Image (cartoon, grey):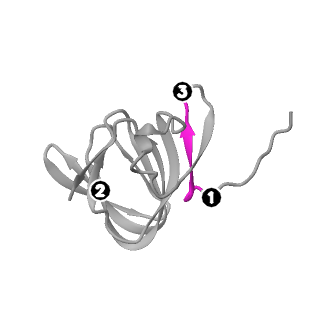
């Protein structure tokens, strides 16, 4: 058996981290977010790079697990809801934040960039800002 190892672009291909410790390569198409809960290759955790040029238009929450957000380039404020209050967490390139499970969060962008997300995506919810 020959193993083929190739570089991936994590902006167009995400990685699903399965319970079995297997990493699954998941291409991102135009309907990716609409069908994410139907995609068994994602597994309970997902890794991807998300470019950002404007503030997010929604809040999100991950009830099944924490989310790691590592800013690779750019700057912004991660807004998190803590005890019913909005708390701003300033982030710039090279910084990382862990958003605890069950905490609603969004991003205000100050400088376009990209971030690496390690997300426990099962049952993720969104709501408008």
Quadrant in which the N terminus is drawn:
top right
Q: What residue do we see at 54% from left, 27% from top?
A: 19
* Residue that mark 1 sits on: 9
Q: Magenta part of the protein: which range?
A: 10-18
Is residue 17 in the magenta section?
yes
Q: Secondary structure at mark 3?
A: loop
Task: State which tag comes first along the sequence, 1 or 2.
Answer: 1
Q: Is residue 127 left or right of residue 55?
A: left
* Residue 103, quarter of the rendered image: top left
Q: Position of residue 21 (x, y in %)?
A: 60, 29
Q: What residue do we see at 55% from left, 59% from top?
A: 11
Q: What residue do we see at 50% from left, 61% from top?
A: 94
Q: How crowded is the residue under tag 3: few (<14 C-alpha within 10 Å), some, or many (20+)?
A: few
User: Is 117 in front, or is 71?
Assistant: 117
Task: State which tag comes first along the sequence, 2 or 3.
Answer: 3
Q: Secondary structure at mark 1?
A: loop
* Residue that mark 3 sits on: 19
Number of numbered callouts drawn: 3
Q: Position of residue 93 (x, y in %)?
A: 47, 65
Q: Position of residue 99 (x, y in %)?
A: 35, 45
In the drawing, what numbered circle is on residue 17?
Answer: none
Q: Is residue 115 left or right of residue 21?
A: left
Q: What residue do we see at 58% from left, 55% from top?
A: 10
User: Is 32 in front, or is 65?
Assistant: 32
* Residue that mark 2 sits on: 106
User: Is 97 in front, or is 22?
Assistant: 22
Q: Is residue 29 above or below residue 51?
A: above
Q: CA distance from mark 2 to mark 3?
A: 27 Å
Is residue 21 in the magenta section?
no
């Amino acid at each position: 058996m020959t193993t083929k190892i190739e570089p991936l672009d994590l902006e167009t291909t995400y990685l699903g981290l399965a319970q079995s410790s297997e990493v699954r390569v998941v291409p991102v198409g135009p309907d990716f977010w609409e069908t994410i809960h139907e995609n068994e290759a994602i597994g309970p955790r997902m890794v991807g790079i998300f470019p950002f040029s404007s503030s997010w238009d929604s809040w999100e929450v991950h009830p099944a697990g924490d989310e790691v957000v590592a800013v690779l380039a750019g700057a912004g404020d991660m807004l998190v809801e803590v005890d019913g209050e909005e708390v701003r967490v300033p982030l710039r390139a090279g910084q990382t934040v862990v958003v605890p499970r069950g905490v609603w969060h969004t991003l205000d962008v100050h400088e376009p960039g990209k971030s690496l997300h390690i997300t426990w995506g099962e049952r993720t919810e969104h709501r408008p800002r």
